[in-house]
Image (cartoon, helix red, strand yellow):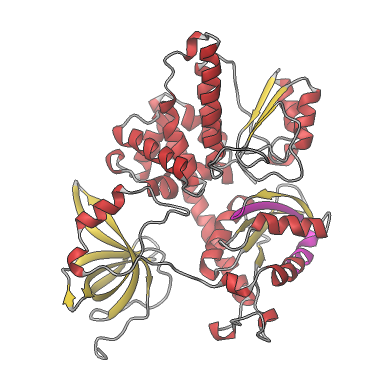
Amino acid sequence: MHIDVDGGTATALLIDFLTQCGARVDFLIPNRVTEGYGLSPALVERAAAHQADCLITVDNGISAFAGVEAAKARGMTVVVTDHHLPGHGIPPADAVVNPNQPGCRFPWKSTCGVGVAFYLAAAIKKVLIAAGHPPVHGLDLGQFLDLVALGTVADVVPLEKNNRIFIRAGLKRLRQGTARTGLRALMRVSGISPATVQAEDLGFRLGPRINAAGRLEDMRVGVRLLLTRDAEEADTLAKKLHSLNGERQQIEAEMLEQALERAQQLLPESPEAIPLTDEDTQAVQAPRILCLQDPQGHEGVVGLVAGRIKERTGLPTLVFAPGADTGVLKGSARSIPNVHIRDFLAEMDAQHPGLILGFGGHAMAAGLTVRTQDFDRFAQIAQALALQRIPFDALAHRVWVDGEIEPDYCTLDLAQEIEAFGPYGNQFPAPLFIGTFRLLKSQRIGKDGQTLKMSVALDGAGRTGQPLQAIQFKRGEVPDPEPGDICRFLYTLSVNRFRGEESLQCIVQQVMEPISAAVV
């Protein structure tokens, strides 16, 4: 769809690295209207106009057969670096660096685009040192770890061993104040203290601001921020990205409202109407996948909206909006652990050639293009295939918890200890606890009133703990529990830092139905 944080950080990393090695290097981001997405023949023509003799892709290219062939015909050396799953075959590049290509023995398959770019830089440095190339002597690859950490967190890849190492090392640079100029500026406009920055800040505060450039305007703004060493330019670019992110949030809110209304029309009216098994006679009435179209939507935000709908419904979700080309829709899919969405789209494409104009992605997310006139047919075929391929029990919402904590053990020390074992994320979640709490007081906070701040006391083992703070984000419009209510929470423990002070805070993931104090 668009170059994202992963592609942007990978671009900045290789530009900076190769420049320090003495290369004459520049970057191109395809124009969606005239050049399409990724490495296309049209983009190759633009590279040729720049007299490029070597072309390196980042975070794309594993399916760019036509683009690679066009570049080779122009006499260019082509290096494809990507982490997405290949389709049928591998493009005829001079080198393909992708942990997910057939036959690759690299163990960490969840390495994202910027991680692949980092490994490429390390390999190039080794070769240049062996060749006696002076500029690389003393070149510290550690300077790029802030970029690798940001791209890895923002791309929500599984946190295998190497990804956790990358994130830890990048956070260390950020906390030491040795991050690149642009990231320091972006942290300032985002209200992030370098001393206490966490992985969540990369994913929820820095990443969205850089992404906003690619979604709404021009990702070159984000890449320029990551490359600049001029503090004044960094401040200007960071403020621009902050403003664009505000626009993105408004567009997303409007699209989400429309998408929720459409999703409610497609879903059963009540949970009781949802079948429990495939044998249930109502099974065909309950959708296994959601396909939503917003004729006035923005193509740069469809992935965010799809993710929100997926979180609300527990169903794989595809959201479409008009593309830059007349007569086409750009779609983004977000899936659940039991449904490999790219393979699902590949099967649709095999069964109905020409229905999908183009697609790509991985297990949990994908992008695709269809003709506007084909949307209804696409949605019907997707639903029919989902009924065949997705068992209903695969859609069951299961939550794995780490048990209950007794009041005496629910302490700041425990929260600090849990934090030290981070970073947490995809396939390495923070410990999730379940507990019974007595609500002391609560209030809605935030601009949109969607955050519930509470004072609670943990009940357990016949004892009531000391009052502590709890907070639930994205509470929605559901009624809030009342003071005195006894509630069951699914929650994580965190360290709340404010004005140099640290305190224990519960991050509530879900509030169970409160039990009235009068009944108790």
Q: How many marks?
A: 0
In depth, the one of 403 and 205 nearer the eye is 403
Q: Which residue shows up at 51% across the image and 22% down it? A: 17
Quadrant housing residue 380: bottom right
| Residue furthest out toward the right | 353
Indicate whether residue 364 is drawn in magenta. Answer: yes
In depth, the one of 273 and 483 nearer the eye is 273
Indicate whether residue 335 is drawn in magenta. Answer: no
Q: Is residue 91 visible?
A: yes
| Residue furthest out toward the bottom | 519
Where's the C terminus, which quadrant? bottom left
Which contiguous range is marked in magenta?
363-380
Q: Is residue 318 above or below residue 40?
A: below
Q: Which residue shows up at 29% across the image and 70% down it? A: 404
Give the left or right position of residue 71, taking residue 184 as reference. Answer: right
- Image coordinates of residue 235 in percent, x first then y, are 40, 33
Give the left or right position of residue 140, taking residue 520 as reference. Answer: right
- Image coordinates of residue 382 in percent, x first then y, are 73, 65
- Image coordinates of residue 108 in percent, x first then y, are 53, 42
In depth, the one of 104 and 221 nearer the eye is 104
Q: Is residue 496 visible?
A: no
Q: Which residue shows up at 54% across the image and 73% down it? A: 396
- Image coordinates of residue 446 in percent, x first then y, are 35, 61
Q: Which residue shows up at 68% across the image and 48% down it? A: 360
Quadrant housing residue 386: bottom right
Q: Is residue 181 above or below residue 98?
A: above
